[in-house]
Each structure stands twice: as structure tokens, then as C-alpha cells.
Image: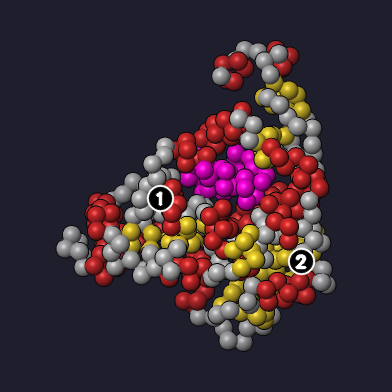
Amino acid sequence: RIRKIAEGMDARELKTHGFKEIKGSLVYGDILPISVSWEQALNYILWRAGFSKDRVYRDTIELLKSQIILRSDPEIALRVRRVYPLEYLHKEGRVLKGYGIPPYLSYIDAERAGIISLFRKKELTHEEEEIFDLIRRYGPIPVKDILASPLMGRESARKALRSIFRSGLVFKNSWGHYLVPEPPDIDRDEAVRLLISAWLDVFGLVTPSHLSSFSGFAVSLWELKKVLREMETEGKIVKGLFLEDDDRVFWIPSGDTKKLSKVKVKEPIVIYQDSLTRLYLADFMKRHMDVGAESLVLDGGKIIGTFSGYRRNGELFISSYKGSSRLTRVVKHAARRSGLAVSEENEDEASEEEYRDYYERAYGR
């Protein structure tokens, strides 16, 4: 409809059809006159994510149901009152393991894993189709039975299984057996709405282009704009040019307009580089602070530095720090709460397999 209205009209004519000129851009519909600094917006996002004492989640299960996927235990400890390790929940059958949205190796709420499959668009090879159909018909099925399939050789079966697993078409249960989750009885628009609602609940501040990129482009820009407009019409969200020095239109929950400019996260926190929160913040950090993929360290609602490193066997190995002199104290405090010991020197060099395992968990490759 907007395209039809816009054809052949100049800016003055467009304004008579509901467009407004803000910061040199024409924006359709109501725009709230609120604008905050990037630092304040970061506080709001982290408050929404549960890093503040007045908004922590009850336990790991409540956080997972809100966020749909989680990637590692350290991203949980500072956000919940009671921590249930993800691997424990996996063994108990409460979560599945697989590639979610974003497309990284994650723990996924077993009741909602079927939603992920609605967004998978992969043209399967003949071998992949055969293995996928085998798992769909007989799953949960152990890997030994998949590889023993008479349909193809073991290496072909192994390659096909790896491909469909990484594509988010199949998941692992508590026994390590592969299964195809039952798809929910909803259409794609409803599934998009569910994802957007989860991201709004956990992060608050969203824009269609950012969400599309964050989803690994599993959800298209057009789909996101369509559903966001519907939610705005229903009064569930409002939009505005909420960030200073950023000309993008953002949406937030309609009840958060005052919180956006007021909430502060006072607690010392670390946002690990492989956490979903850090992945969500990546675009913001590049735009506003020129920060790469390092872990973030905050104290009193301000970023005091970053560090690079990796985790192994309950220990956090730091390769480099950058920032305030308070940095190491905050990192050690947060690491203790996450059940991690901190080491700045790694005399026992990690094996190639351990590095590969860590980077697969962190970056999905």
C-alpha cells in the first residue's frame, strides 16, 4: 500500500498520506519523540535480558522458555536465581541439542523446537533426503542405526547426517539419538510473530534488518516488517528513532517507553562472546563502538573493557584484556558466579579437538 501511495508523489504529498519527515527521512505512521544515547540503550537491552536484579528470571527453564534457545551455562548464571546446567536439562529430556535461530549449536526448548524447522530452507541431496526421511519415520534413532542403513555407504550417510543436523532439520535428544521435531500447528506468520515476541521480551529494542541478520536470514526482512506493522497496529509495540546518531527506526514493547530512558544495570557483568546476548549486540557494537567479537565487561551500566579467550573444563582462559583497571576484578567476580576459574596464562596448551569444539559452540563452524 505504501508503494502505491508513494509512486509519483513528492515529499509534501506523501506527508498528507501519513508520512512524517524526521532526521531527513520520511517515516510512515506514528513516531515517538524519544531518543537516548547508545549507552542508555545498552542498559535497557541488558535490563530486558535479565542482567539486573529487579528482572532476573526464576531459573534456567523460565529463561529458556522465554528465549527459546541458550548456548552455554555462563550466559545463564548472571540472569537467573536458580541455575540448572544445560547439559543436565538435556540429559533429563527437557531440552534438545541442535542448530537453532540464530544458526549456532544450541540447547533448544524441546516443546518449541518444531518452530525452528518451519524456517529451514535447504534443498536436500538424494542422500540427505533419504537420511532425513529415515529419521522422520523411525526417530529418535541412534547414529549407529543411521550409518548402518542399506540405502548408502557409511561415509555417505555420515556426511548427509552432518549436513541436515547443521541445517537445523534434525536434533539430538538426551540419548544422543536423532529426531525430527513435531512441527507446531501454526502458519509461518504466527511462527514469525512468536520469534519476534521472544526477541522483544528478551532484548526489547528491535529493527527488521537487525532481526533478519540475527536470525541468520532465516526470517526475511519483508516478513519481519509485515508482522511488526501488525503488532504496532494492535498496540503491542511502538516505533521511533530511539537511538541518537542512528537513523534506523526501532520498535519496543509499548509499555517500555519510560524504561528505555531510565533503567540502569548497576551490577558488574560479563557478556561472553559465545552467548546469544553478545550475538544480538554484535551489530550495535560495530556501529557505535567499533568493537569486534570480544567478550564485554560492564560495571555500573558502563562498558569498562573487553577481553578475548576461551573456556575449557570449567576454566576461563584469557588471552588479552583491553580497558579499565577494574576489568580483571569484574571478570573474576562474574566467572566465580558462573562456576569458572580464571587463568591468564595457559601452560597446558589446548588440543586441536578442544579448540574445534569450543569454536563450533561459539560460532557454529
Query: What residue is at 30 percent from the left and 62 percent from the top?
Result: 140
Residue in the foreground of this view, choosing between 232 and 214: 232
Residue found at the far left of this picture: 150
* Disc 1: CA contacts within 10 A as few (<14), some (14-19) or many (>=20): many
Q: Which mark is residue 268?
A: 2
x, y (%) of residue 279?
61, 56
Q: Main secondary structure of the magenta part?
A: helix
Q: CA distance from mark 1 to mark 2?
A: 36 Å
Residue 184 appears at what percent x and percent y? 40, 45
Residue named by callout 1 = 114
Give the residue at the far bottom of this rendering. Answer: 347
Which residue shows up at 41% across the image and 39% down it? 186
Identify the amino acid type marked 1: Gly
Q: Secondary structure at mark 2?
A: loop
Q: Are marks 1 and 2 in contact (CB under 8 Å)?
A: no
Residue shown at the point (57%, 30%) measured from the top left = 230
Q: Is residue 285 visible?
A: no
Residue 269 at what x, y percent from top left? 72, 65
Can you say whether 295 is above or below 229 in the image?
A: below
The single residue placed furthest to the front in the displayed view is 58
Residue drawn where x is 63% and y is 35% of the image: 236
Quadrant holding the N terminus: top right
Element type at mark 1? helix
Residue 247 located left or right of residue 340:
right
> Looking at the image, is 75 positioned above or below residue 279?
below
Is residue 161 found left or right of 153 in the rendered image?
A: right
Residue 207, magenta (yes or no): yes
Q: In the drawing, does residue 114 fall left or right of residue 71?
A: left
Q: Which residues are magenta?
A: 194-220
Colour scheme of the rendered structure: secondary structure
Q: Is residue 66 above or below residue 343?
A: above
Q: Amino acid at mark 2?
A: Pro
